[in-house]
Amino acid sequence: MNNISRTDSINQLVPVPHHVNLSPQQIVRLLSVPSSSRITAALYTYADAITQRHFGSGVWTRGIVEFSNVCVKNCGYCGIRRSRRGVVRYTLSTAEVLECARFCMERRYGTIMLQSGELPTEKRISWLAELIRKIRDDTKMMDPAGRGLCVALSVGELSRKWYETLYEAGARRYLLRIETSSPWLYSKLHPANHSWHNRVECLRVLKDIGFQLGSGFLVGVPGGNTRTLARDIAFMGTIGADMVGVGPYVYQNKTPVGELWEAEHRKMSLEEVEQEKKELVEMTRKVIALLRVTMGDVNIPATTALQALDAVGREKALGCGANVVMPIVTPARWRKEYQLYEGKPCVEDDAPKCARCVDRRVEWAGKTIELGEWGDPPSCGRRTTTGNR
């Protein structure tokens, strides 16, 4: 019996709850169960049943535009960290980003995600605010309903004033990954001048302004374990995240965390490393499933990093709780310069090819892409997000 029929059977036999409250100890035990066990299979099926209760078989799309890899931060795991040599820095022009927005509108993606390295300057924020206004104006004119694209941002830690500027310009979603809910582990992954507490305060401010809040964390990062992951899952509920993006840690050379990974794996055989990758994919799937089970109706993307470790990693995520896909729309000539981790998929593709690929992956997973929808999660339905529409 395949995943879909198992889920249908559950829906027919028992009522599927909005979500399930689990203690940290219960989450740790479920994360520790072998991936091949019946318990893990049941967890995946139950998570998919909760997903279908809230979203049916629909999957929402967000077209990602990686508009700049210029970054002042030096995160220890990142391929575009400030001090990493060999990275060709770039920033797209307004015209290039608007062309990407038109493609998203023509493909009926519903949402455009503008992502970049962190560059907290007045010049960048003014440019970005004007860009947001142009995207909203241009795409509303393309839309018979006059709604246009939802604009989501992932541009890092900023002041409250600048967050408000971007919100007033028309952005309605913001992704700021915490990467770990442990201040201690955060300090191991970042330089001393990177503050976990400041990042948490940014999350609070974003929520207070009215953004739909996205965050997330790494699975399998050196220093992490099932206990830190259980706290990460609980933390997403504590901050009231509307979207949670999780992905496996993928090695990147010439980075401090990459060097830690090298030291841990130096004596492992190639077969052992490959087996560990398989286990990391399954651990990520368990985390996705537990986020769905414990948080209910939030948006959870099937992240590209899963595909870096498993050719059908994103499809597997869609079968155990994920309900969002994020095809890359970045112009092809710049994609190789936005590699946050080694082996990032799609760097040789263009936007139309990525679109066709995502369509096939969603279909293979037994799901259906919901075209032309902003895809607001029910979790944010109790507060208005309609300004500047």
Image (cartoon, grey):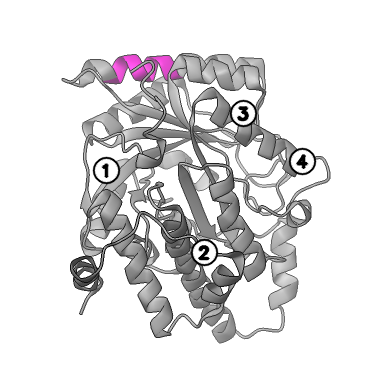
Q: Position of residue 310 (x, y in %)?
A: 42, 69
Q: Position of residue 32 (x, y in %)?
A: 56, 78
Tell me what residue is drawn at x 21 percent, y 62 percent.
366
Q: Position of 239 compared to 222: left or right?
A: left
Say if the magenta span includes residue 135.
Answer: yes
Helix, strand or loop at label 3? It is helix
Residue situated in front as seen by the camera: 245 or 213: 213
Residue 22 is marked as 2
Helix, strand or loop at label 1? It is helix
The kind of residue tagged 4 is: Ser
- Please determine whether, in this image, residue 25 is positioned above or below residue 143: below
First in sequence: mark 4 vs mark 3: 4
Q: Give the position of the N terminus as an image quadrant.
A: bottom left
Helix, strand or loop at label 2? It is loop
Residue carrying label 4: 195
Mark 3 nearby-residue class (10 Å; few <14, some 14–19, many ≥20): some
Magenta residues span 132-139
Residue 205 is marked as 3
Residue 352 is marked as 1
Between circles 4 and 3, the one closer to the viewer is: 3
- Please determine whether, in this image, residue 375 is positioned above or below residue 169: below
Q: Position of residue 365 (x, y in %)?
A: 25, 63
